[in-house]
Amino acid sequence: MSTFIQRYTRRERINHWVVAIAFVLAALSGLALFHPAFFFLVHLFGGGPWTRILHPFIGVVMFLFFIVMAALFWRFNHITAADRQWMKRIGDVMRNRDQGLPELGKYNAGQKYLFWILVVSVPVLLISGIVIWQPWFAPYFPVWLLRVAVVIHALAAWIMILGIVVHVYALFWVRGTMRAMTRGTVSDAWAKHHHRAWYREMTGK
Ligand code: HEM
């Protein structure tokens, strides 16, 4: 019978899922405003005006919960020499040839780089979003700044959407990862195989 190790507390999981739900809603409402091809998505939010009104508030909720999550996970995401070595051998990781790969702590280098991409892109989205937020803040800024902020906002949003697509794809690719964020636990075998240094730390084995 397989045994399980705790990976996330209930508080961490609730925090993560609030961020994830806010992200999906912000992305769908943002796409609806971004291009006419996505305009049909406004029906999910009660029409065009409501989509425009709700989008920035959803973004603020995502930002606030993301900051708490980033603070909780910060210390596990420092890039080490072992991470750089793992990244150089990414081809072997993909082919499941893990002999001689460095032992990993709680996260692999891909997860850590994604974490830092999010740590930059979420505040950039908030700041550029505040600059273009009608009717509250936008009137205080010059038109050239609004134009720059719109471009930065759209670029940061695309980077974040691509990052989260990779994040979710990787979860399905590495079987047994999803339950870490649903039930809070992972199997011994999963931990030993993918994050051996973390497994040793947690179990003392
Ligand atoms: C939309 C669907 C999403 C799903 C299904 C999902 C699922 C998961 C799962 C299962 C884990 C655990 C991975 C592990 O412990 O190895 C995880 C970790 C994590 N997720 Fe998500 N997630 C989603 C969206 C998001 C979003 C929108 C963000 C941030 C904006 C996010 C940020 C994180 C972070 C920071 C971690 C910890 C990894 C690290 O710190 O490097 N997730 N997610």
Image (cartoon, helix red, strand yellow):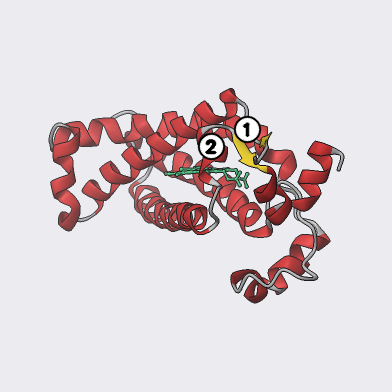
The answer to whether marks 2 and 1 mark residues whose Cβ atoms lie closer than 8 Å is yes
Horizontal and vertical percent position of residue 66: 53, 35
Label 1 sits on a secondary structure element that is loop
Label 2: element kind: helix
Mark 2 Cα-neighbour bin, 10 Å: few <14, some 14–19, many ≥20? some
The residue beneath circle 1 is 8
Is residue 117 or residue 174 the one in the foreground? 174
Q: Is mark 2 within 8 Å of ligand 1?
A: yes
Q: For the residue marked with disc 1, what is the amino acid? A: Tyr
Give the residue displayed 61% in from the left and 35% down from the top: 185
Q: Which quadrant of the structure image shows residue 99? A: bottom right
Residue in the image at 41% along x and 53% along y = 161
The C terminus appears in which quarter of the rendering?
A: top right
Q: What numbered label is drawn on residue 75? A: none
Find residue 100 and report its image quarter. Answer: bottom right
- Can residue 142 be seen at all in this image of the molecule? yes
